[in-house]
Amino acid sequence: MEQSVGIITIGQTPRVDMIPAIRGFFPAETVIIEKGVLDGRPQEEILSLTPEPGQTTLISRLKDGGKAVMAKEKIVPIVQQLIDELNQQNVSLIVLACTGQFPCFRSEVPVVYPDHLLSHVVQGVLQGGLLGVIIPLPEQAPAIIQKWKAADFDVIPAASSPYLFQEKELIKAIKQLESFPIKAIILDCMGYTEEMKQMAQAYTTKPILLSRTIIYRMIGEIL
């Protein structure tokens, strides 16, 4: 049976780096409706969303392949607006395509929160301990430490952006984490790809968990 899934990115659509990969996990007849927090917004408005002291830093992809950095606190109302729009479009499920922590949004349609899903899957597999976590930006380290602490994990963060990607930067981050007694390495952003995971795996003996495929597989199970 054909059904529609709404996918909200905190960047701009179309997410050519993400949606083709998603389709491989969803039933063939699934209709995907993309909405982006930054869609249609001029550069000056995007810049106004830049984090201020004390705010949580998020990063996502622009449609031209560039990146945008924004404060989670500033985009929460925009995400709610997009959820409202998708409710009016009669989708059967809404996916917030970001592994950052967000408040619960108002919605008649079920909303998938990747950060909850990811942390519970990792808890079920590894039951606490020390993790290596790859994040896009160094300034995201305090928030990521706090996020995983709530799931009973201590983490060592290392930065390598999936946007404006540099292979040597990822390899350096993986080698840095490999020197610690970690249980696994989490690629903690929906922007990291399967290709990046395979590239990284060549430089570590630890298992690497790719957040986007964990999320996609679980959603595919309920569609």
Image: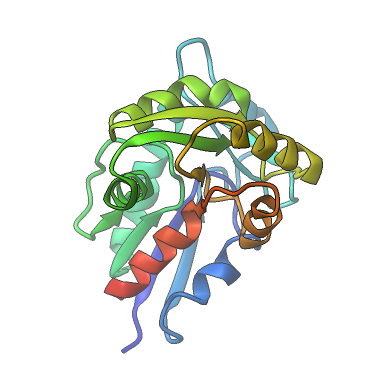
Q: Residue furthest top?
A: 53
Number of numbered callouts drawn: 0
Rendered view: 206 above or below 7:
above
Q: Which residue does the image show at 73% across and 42% down from the upper left?
A: 171
Q: Residue furthest left?
A: 108
Residue 104, picture quadrant: top left
Q: Is residue 127 left or right of residue 214?
A: left
Rendered view: 21 above or below 215:
below
- The picture places residue 44, in percent across and down from the top left corner, at 67, 28
Q: Which residue does the image show at 61% across and 37% down from the upper left?
A: 178
- The picture places residue 184, in percent across and down from the top left corner, at 48, 44
**One can see residue 136 in this view:** no
Task: Point out the image quarter for the N terminus.
Answer: bottom left
**One can see residue 84 in this view:** yes
> Which residue is at the front of the view, 131 or 76?
131
Q: How is the image coloured?
A: rainbow
Task: Point out the image quarter for the C terminus.
Answer: bottom left
- The picture places residue 183, in percent across and down from the top left corner, at 45, 42
Residue 163, picture quadrant: top right
Q: Is residue 120 left or right of residue 195?
A: left
Q: Residue furthest bottom?
A: 1
- The picture places residue 84, in percent across and down from the top left corner, at 31, 52
Q: Which residue does the image show at 42% across and 38% down from the upper left?
A: 100
Rendered view: 187 above or below 136:
below
Residue 85, picture quadrant: bottom left
Q: Which residue does the image show at 35% across and 48% down from the upper left?
A: 122
Q: Is residue 217 left or right of residue 45?
A: left
> Which residue is at the front of the view, 105 or 43?
105
